[in-house]
């Protein structure tokens, strides 16, 4: 009986392993085709100024419009795209498309705001990344100050590479944010010495500001530290007014999250921006509501 069970376990394990390997290969193939067939698209999530409630930026977030599976979120294909290397051409497409779209919005009369693009580790280690970024700006005609790149803490570990990359970006005039701040390798060294513009507090800290005093302390400390280092701070994953109030009280500059808006397809961005033209998009004035 026990032996039988063991054998069954082994068989399950084997077939699961084979299944995974096959799945990876299929996914790799599918993603290559998807890129050629134009199945990827970008959603954009608004970022709000916490003092005025105005929309001051947009983060580009990739989606896969799969012919069978429907709209696939990045969590389900970015890790595989990283592993297989497809993230490099995919990331270049994202960069180009975000610049093109932002320029198109500006040309259509939308008030100009920066678009943020996520960079993957794999892209970061490409030698000609700066050239690719400069190329995307040039082809789209977007001014460099309307592009921001989001990198993660892990990319700052190769200090020399990161420093020269960031300096070149700064010379180009492109903004830099550290994404998911607090979840990775954080070094006060890079915070002090790297030419970065802002920190994005990871949503795991923001989530339970209300009932976890440790997370509240961490968020308050990140905001204070960032400001002392002349960095902007943006909180991600903001879902409640309670979180908004806490962030305002601690002087956080901006927020992004479902409380403001989920990521939107580009038509949704255009109509939202039109609807809130010349006024606050969110009523978060501390005096006006509870
Ligand atoms: P991220 O850069 O930290 O992006 C924020 C993620 O949080 C987005 O998920 C967004 O939809 C989600 N989010 C926003 N507000 C809230 C909220 O209030 N509550 C909760 N629970 N979630 C919220 P999404 O779009 O699924 O993206 C997940 C991750 O995939 C991104 O995390 C980013 O690391 C990666 N990613 C997305 N697009 C790209 C891309 O073009 N290139 C690369 N390299 N990575 C990307
Ligand atoms: Mg991001
Ligand atoms: Mg983030
Ligand atoms: Mg995140």
Image: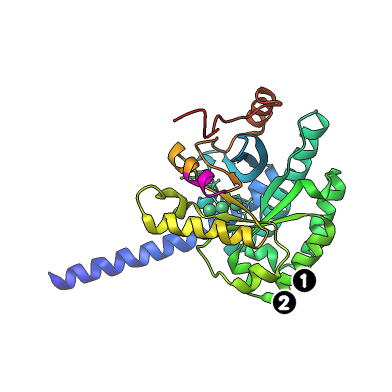
Q: Nearer the viewer, residue 97 or 209?
A: 209
User: Any magenta on residue 249?
Assistant: yes
Marker disc for residue 160: 2
Label 2 beta carbon less than 8 Å to ligand 1: no
Mark 2 touches mark 1? (CB < 8 Å): yes
The residue at the point 49 percent across, 51 percent down is: 203
The residue at the point 84 percent across, 54 percent down is: 135
Give the quarter of the figure containing the C terminus. top left
Q: Would you place residue 46 above or below residue 270 in this image?
A: below
Q: Nearer the viewer, residue 114 or 95?
A: 114
Q: Quadrant of residue 158?
A: bottom right
Give the SS element for disc 1: helix
Going by the picture, which residue comes out furthest to the left?
1
Q: Would you place residue 31 above or below residue 191 in this image?
A: above
Residue 263 appears at what percent x and percent y? 57, 38
Image side of residue 193 versus residue 72, left or right:
right
**Residue 77 visible to the viewer:** no
Marks 2 and 1, how far apart at CA: 6 Å
Label 1, on which residue?
Answer: 164
The residue at the point 73 percent across, 71 percent down is: 163
Going by the picture, which residue comes out furthest to the top?
275
Q: Which residues are magenta?
A: 246-251
Q: Within 10 angstroms of label 2, few (less than 14), some, or many (20 or more) residues?
A: few
């Amino acid at each position: 009986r026990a032996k039988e069970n063991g054998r069954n376990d082994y068989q399950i394990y084997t077939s699961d392993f084979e299944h995974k390997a096959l799945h990876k290969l299929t996914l790799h193939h599918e993603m290559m085709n998807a890129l050629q067939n134009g199945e990827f698209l970008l959603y954009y999530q608004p970022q709000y100024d916490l003092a005025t409630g105005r929309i001051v930026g947009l983060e580009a977030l990739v989606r896969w419009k799969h012919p069978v599976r429907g709209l696939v979120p990045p969590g389900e294909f970015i890790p595989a795209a990283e592993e297989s290397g497809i993230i490099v051409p995919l990331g270049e497409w994202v960069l180009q498309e975000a610049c093109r779209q932002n320029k198109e919005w500006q040309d259509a009369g939308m008030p100009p705001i920066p678009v943020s693009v996520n960079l993957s580790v794999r892209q970061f280690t490409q030698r000609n990344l700066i050239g690719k970024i400069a190329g995307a700006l040039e082809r789209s005609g977007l001014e460099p100050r309307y592009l921001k790149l989001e990198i993660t803490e892990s990319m700052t570990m190769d200090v020399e590479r990161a420093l020269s990359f960031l300096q070149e970006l700064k010379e180009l005039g492109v903004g830099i944010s550290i994404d998911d701040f607090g979840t990775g390798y954080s070094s006060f060294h890079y915070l002090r010495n790297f030419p970065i513009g802002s920190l994005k507090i990871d949503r795991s800290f923001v989530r339970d500001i209300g009932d976890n005093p440790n997370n509240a302390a961490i968020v308050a400390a990140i905001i204070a530290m960032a400001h002392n280092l002349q960095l902007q701070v943006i909180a991600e994953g903001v879902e409640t007014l309670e979180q908004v109030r806490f962030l305002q009280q601690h002087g956080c500059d901006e927020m992004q999250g479902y409380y403001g808006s989920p990521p939107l397809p580009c038509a949704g961005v255009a109509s939202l921006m039109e609807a809130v033209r010349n006024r606050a998009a969110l009523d978060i004035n501390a005096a006006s509501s509870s």
